[in-house]
Amino acid sequence: MKRFLNFLSAATLLLVTNSLFAQSIPEIRFESQPDLLSMPDDIYLGEAVGVATNSHGHLYVYTRSGSSNVTLGSNRVFRRSSSRLFEFDANGKYVREIGQGLYAFLFAHTVRVDSEDNIWIVDEGSNMVVKFDPDGKVLLTLGRTPEAVRNPSPRGAELRRNDGVGIEGDIFGRPTDVAWDADGNIFVSDGYNNSRVAKFDRYGAFITSWGSYGAELGEFNTLHTIATDADGNVYVGDRGNRRIQVFDNDGNFKSVITGIGAPWAICISPGPHQYLYSSNSSGTSNLSDGEIYKMELDGTILGKFGRAGRMLGEFASTHEIDCRTENTLYVGEILSWRVQKLTLYP
Amino acid sequence: MQRNSSVIFFGLSLFLASSVFLSGSIIAQTPEAPRIAYESVPDFIKMPDGLYMGEAMGVATNSQGEFYVYTRSGEATRLFQFDANGNFMREIGYGLYGMVFAHAVRVDADDNIWVVDEGSDMVIKFNPAGRVMLTIGRRPEAQGLRETPERGAPRPEARQYNLGRPTDIGWDPQGNIFISDGYINSRVVKYDKEGRYLGEVGTRGSEIGQMSTPHTMQVDAEGNVFVGDRGNRRIQVFDNDLNFKYVIEGIGAPWAVCISPGPHQFLYSSNSNTTGNTAASYDNAGEIYKMELDGTIIGRFGTGGKRLGEFGSTHAMDCRNPDELLIAEVTTFRVQKILLSSDVTLP
């Protein structure tokens, strides 16, 4: 209980700090590059839910696209969604597709690139996390595609968010994101249904997991995005609770960041001075909010930029941000089926 | 009333007004509407070997006379482009996430191509090069086509940025976007050209201002909105702010409407025969009306049927040239080019 009170006072302090700053958050000037991605004539992006760069500036986009998979509607037969993974060079020129028809590609959620340029996808439809080497070969899988995927997948009243409490393994429930520490340990935010963070070693062996559904500190309501800093601390975007919770490398609660709306997508820039970005994305049924915050790792807000909308430089449900370079951000959006390259002028 | 063409103005004087008009000169008895002579160009569309048209749900020309067909095909809903002579040019958007179950295609004043998809609940704008420029609505993450609610059933909550099996799209001269929405939501929604919600009209029902499957819609040069209220067998006309203006009846069920451009605009509406292909459906449906914008019938042409020059459930019309119509049909997997004659004969 004393430990909990400590959490609370730390949380209150941070909350107060951000509220005080809320009056005077500086606007960061930025530009979005027009016509960033050049696609082949016969390939189209769908919902650009995942975007990540590698060390050469190549861009990976994990998108919800069409496919020949068929589902039964109420009275018609037509295609269901599927996922595709595209690679682009640093100028946005299409390079190739990876993983065509892969068994784990069902309903895209995020893509991340690790420090060795391996490409990791998180698929909330197949409940899988898949690691590709830079050549596109599958190196590691976590989770397993259910033998029969329910359609529709559980949501709303059907959503049972505590199913995964205490699972010692990789039975995911609509996982959302992945991150790694300096030793290569793997952290999976899991997710819509399971409300836990699961930690695995670099070979995929389970180490620990923490969290359950709820609004208390250490509990989650749709943990939607995750990132680690250079010290191995774990930042969890607890979207439904409108806060980022910070844990140490073993899952012990450290602090909470509020006053930044609902964190749909977070990223942490590399280098000696790391920054935390978080998007208070507009929902998929409105065009409100939409701004992205730039913070110190302790949650101090340095500035914000952008708003909801569908024009260049506006954001329609930002779903993932890449910030390998502090002032060059890639933003993937659900609704506008595009990736924007932003240059910040802080 | 069903077989009269009348223009009924809304207000307390509704019945008086219609009585006046019933005895006035603009009333035409539908069976006696003048017949417009016409012919259909044989073998108009030329497909490449191995590529087939499915149900031709939407057809629209651009300013070059090229045209687009939005079709429900075997594997997918597809968008094809043809030149003015009907030669296949290319496909746009194969495998696109929003192409699920075709409903309409329209081309705006800048030759952008807009598709309306009732399976993905989306409207998608392509530039002339075929690049996605704007999306409205969002494809449900996992579900089939939704059933139209029973008559009298409460309409599901219609949200500003979510569509419910939308059916058609139009623009006013300022570029504002109007979407008829649709099988589920029974409304017309207005967005600005950047896709921001401005307003809407309509609930499910048969009163004035209510709609029962708004299935087709176009906007005239003054920004008035013509809504084919198919289930209520009428066209309702609203001003640019979606205030009711008047209603056009006596033209059957408007499955497809189009409005020609130019200084003198004409309104076309198809009383399409149903897809069940019953013999009776040819007797009382299938014809297309040519009207003044106020609803005065100039003439009618065509019948239901599957032969050349007959119409198999007309689903869309293009009338950029008021004497050369492109007609897309559901059941015959084809688009016909119809040349209207100036010969108009009284029955």
Image (spheres, grey):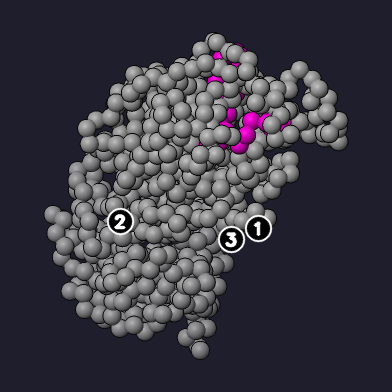
Quarter assignment of residue B345: top right
Residue topped by disc 3:
A20
Q: Which residues are magenta?
A: B246-273
The chain letter under disc 3 is A
The chain letter under disc 2 is A
Q: Residue at x 66, y 26 (%)?
A: B30
- Whether callout 1 and callout 3 share a subunit is answered no
Quarter assignment of residue A340: top left
Residue B25 within the segment the image draws in magenta: no
Q: A243 or B191, which lies in front?
A: B191
| Residue A287 horizontal/vertical position (percent) | 54, 48
Going from N to C along the chain, the mark reached first, 2 or 3, is: 3
Q: Amino acid at mark 1?
A: Ala
Q: Amino acid at mark 3?
A: Leu
Gap between marks 2 and 1 measured at Cα: 33 Å
Q: Residue at x 86, y 36 (%)?
A: B12
Badge 3 crowding class, 10 Å Cα cut-off, few under 14, some 14 to 19, many 20 or more, is: few
Gap between marks 1 and 3 measured at Cα: 49 Å
| Residue B250 horizontal/vertical position (percent) | 68, 31
Gap between marks 2 and 3 measured at Cα: 51 Å
Q: Does the rendering let one see residue A239?
A: yes
Q: Quadrant of the N terminus of chain B?
A: top right
Q: Does the rendering let one see residue A274?
A: no
Q: Residue at x 34, y 42 (%)?
A: B73
Residue B261 within the segment the image draws in magenta: yes
Please give the label number shown on residue A69: 2
Badge 2 crowding class, 10 Å Cα cut-off, few under 14, some 14 to 19, many 20 or more, is: few
Please give the label number shown on residue B153: 1
